[in-house]
Image (cartoon, rainbow, N blue to C red):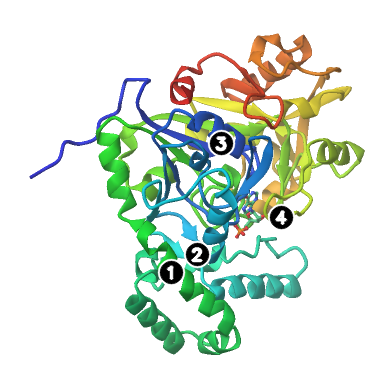
Amino acid sequence: MTSEPMKRSTSHQSGITIVVGAQWGDEGKGKWIDWIAGGADIVARYQGGNNAGHTLYVKGQKVVLHQIPSGIFHGGQKCVLAAGVVINPGELVREMEKVAPFAKATPDNLWLSARAHTITPWHIATDGRREAQREAAASGSAIGTTKRGIGPTYSEKTARSGLRFGDYVNPVARKNWMEAMASAVDGFAAHCESHKAEWESFSKVAAQLAPFVCDAEARVRKAAGEGKKILMEGAQGTLLDLDHGTFPFVTSSSTIAAGACASLGIPPRAVTGIYGIAKAYLTRVGAGPFPTELTNETGNALRERGQEFGATTGRPRRCGWFDAVAMRYAQDVNGFDGVILNKFDILSGMDELKIAVAYEHPELGCIEQFPWNAEILAACKPVYKTFPGWHGDLPKTGGIEALPKAALDYIRAIEESSGIKVVAAGTGPGREEALLGRDLERLVALNS
Ligand code: IMP
């Protein structure tokens, strides 16, 4: 029997929406995914692991989620960790306990893909060791990873020797994997011996998670075929994508919109909307080139006002001006239907604002296209356009046109220089602190 192929939906009431970080991560995806998720039937994380940190406010309380999609707080929704995700089992159990006062994670509302790969104590130790080696080898060669074992787990997956989650929760398959690793990988057996307690707790939580493990992709495809509303949630951001980001200063997964389809086994033609989340300025955490970085008082002011400290590691984020060259690239790579500009309120009170519209390279001259090479990008100086700022508090809710003229001019300049359509602006951390713009109908349909 053949099943009906999934078609591109023309209805704004159903379909598959992808939400992607448009910059170097930390764009405030958690707040917006929470906002959009209100009307979705399924919210699926499509890559990354507990290197991500999505901050949201539930009943006035700050909650940081690293693995569970924020849909967990909207009763009745199914939350998915899809095949492209790497899962830290112990941390996932702790996160389930953290959300328990607000929402109970059950096998009915939390689906863990049997195809997802497992972050083990070995991978976490390897991440730390490799970073230390890079730091010792040459200054500037460390990536500044979150040390959560992300890179080593994805490496193991692509080497086809990783531990899939369906095998992790099966005691026999897990034992076989550990024996295979012990005989093939130097130092693995010794690590297991010297980190007994970690490995014991790693094995112990497997039984607790086993009921949650399923063929999540098949369930999502079935739901999509039934016209359910599906939100695919990215972590990190476009410029941290393994292939299309600022390699090697990237994460180890496919963060871009296309990665969602690969991770969930969804035909690209079934996708009905792709939205980017960007900050109204720019930040980066960890090492790597950042042409518009401000290492002065203005950068410090952005960090303090925007509370730019990593949700996962607490590291101070590097801050800088909006980069339209990078945003044009993100638009080209993802094909956004619209972009939400977040943390707009942080810019209030600045006398002037700058947008990088091109780069100047000492040998290559003027560059308008985001370079493929991190060394070239590191040598680029931004070519800025300057705009007057605005003072005073911004409206918290309503239409985007309620913004002061200088703020609207700034948005227009971002749209023109980046080739994007700004569909909403974030004016505070709360779910309701959002100014809505044009062409939001598909997102609003999901949000209703
Ligand atoms: P990894 O993902 O831990 O391997 O780290 C690789 C790079 O991605 C480092 O520069 C990290 O700082 C960065 N990174 C990883 N996750 C996030 C995130 O959620 N937000 C921002 N940067 C991230």
Extreme residue toward the front, this view = 101
The amino acid type, in three-letter code, at marker 1 is Ala
* Residue 329, quarter of picture: top right
The percent position of residue 257, horizontal first and vertical second, equals 46, 40
First in residue order: circle 2 vs circle 1: 2
Per the rendering, the mark at residue 330 is 3
Location of mark 1 (residue): 206
The amino acid type, in three-letter code, at marker 2 is Pro
For the residues marked 2 and 4, what is the alpha-carbon distance in whole angstroms?
Answer: 25 Å
Would the CB of label 4 be found within 8 Å of ligand 1? yes
First in residue order: circle 3 vs circle 1: 1
Location of mark 2 (residue): 89
* Residue 166, quarter of picture: bottom left
| Foreground of the two, 66 or 296 | 66
Report whether 151 appears left or right of 116.
right
The percent position of residue 235, horizontal first and vertical second, equals 55, 46
Q: Residue at x 62, y 50 (%)?
A: 246
Q: Residue at x 72, y 13 (%)?
A: 403
Location of mark 4 (residue): 286
For the residues marked 4 and 1, what is the alpha-carbon distance in whole angstroms?
Answer: 32 Å
Q: Quadrant of ligand 1?
A: bottom right
